[in-house]
Image (cartoon, grey):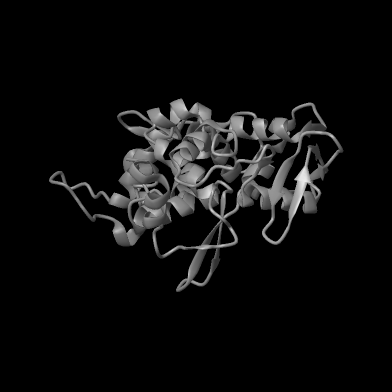
Amino acid sequence: MSIITTAPAVPSRVLALYASLLANPTGERKERFESLATPPSLHGRGAGEDGEGTTTLFSSTLREAKLLGIFEEDEERIKVSEEARSKGTKRDPEARLKSHLVRILFDPKRAEEARQRGFMTALAWFLRQNPLVPMAFGAPPQSEITKDLGEHAHRTELTNINTWQNFVYWARFLGFATTTGSKESKWVVPDPMHAMRDVLPNVFGEDEELPIDAMLAGLARIYPVFEGGDVRREVEDWSSAVPNQSSEKRLSVATSLALQRLHTSGRIALIVRADAPAAIMPLGTSERRVSHVRLGVAK
């Protein structure tokens, strides 16, 4: 079971439960918490022999939140875990929850323990897709995954429309995807710009400027789904796509466009210096080379 395969555990519901308990260090009685968290129209559905009303909506979301280390539960009460509480921070609940999820979902060992490993595999595959060719939200890309990853396709856990759409919700919440279009015709684009932006201070540390290889390595240490990361390399090894034979590093279009947008917004400055090792950024209709990245001033 994982956040991809558990349809009710979408980010908005997990965030709502998290925010409702965050301000209460002692937690809440489970029965009362369920009553507050479940829409009145769903109260009582699926009641067991003991007469207590339960819902798949609440129980599935709570189960995944516990696996992710967000909540702790004893015999009577549910509360936010100390790690997920992020003591000492003044950030809003959404930022605090994202910070916690990054620690769990992007650490291979912890993700495996939480039964969430499929999310990183799916995300690494997703970020290799061309954002200039959007994917349909209403049509799971099973055939494309199977064609690309062959016998390893199942490792993404993207097996049907429900798992695909749930994956999109989580990828978007964590800053790796954008959706566009109408309810009747929605499209999905790999877009990791916000995820990159959120961790720039961690990537640069005390440095104001880094060689592109060092910058990408720092990014991959936090998010192993980017170029050079362990999960990304694993997916690339499975892929049927012809590997790049160039002596220069060639980034994916998704990574390149995200870096270019961060450059345009002033968050970073992309620099090319003669005789310095460089990476090639394909941008669709053009390419640019970059050898160094300087941290800019947030706008």
Query: Could you say where residue 124 lies in the image, as x and y percent from the top left?
Result: 50, 42
User: In the picture shown, does residue 285 fall above or below 90?
Assistant: below
Decide which of 29, 85 is in the foreground and name it: 85
**In this picture, residue 188 sits left or right of residue 250:** left
**In this picture, residue 178 sits left or right of residue 10:** right
User: In the picture shown, does residue 113 fall above or below 95?
Assistant: above
Decide which of 52, 104 is in the foreground and name it: 104
**Figure disc tally:** 0
Question: Residue drawn at (24%, 50%), measured in percent from left and top?
Answer: 53
Residue 280 visible, this orientation: yes
Q: Which image quarter: residue 278?
A: top right
Query: Could you say where residue 59 lies in the image, as x and y percent from the top left?
Result: 31, 45
The quarter of the picture where the N terminus appears is top left
- Please identify the residue farthest to the left as the structure is shown: 49
Residue 33 visible, this orientation: no
**In this picture, residue 133 sits left or right of residue 109:** right
**In this picture, residue 13 sits left or right of residue 267:** left
Question: Residue drawn at (60%, 33%), measured in percent from left and top?
Answer: 220
Decide which of 115, 226 is in the foreground and name it: 226
Query: Could you say where residue 45 lies in the image, as x and y percent from the top left?
Result: 23, 56
Query: Could you say where residue 24 lies in the image, as x and y percent from the top left?
Result: 50, 36
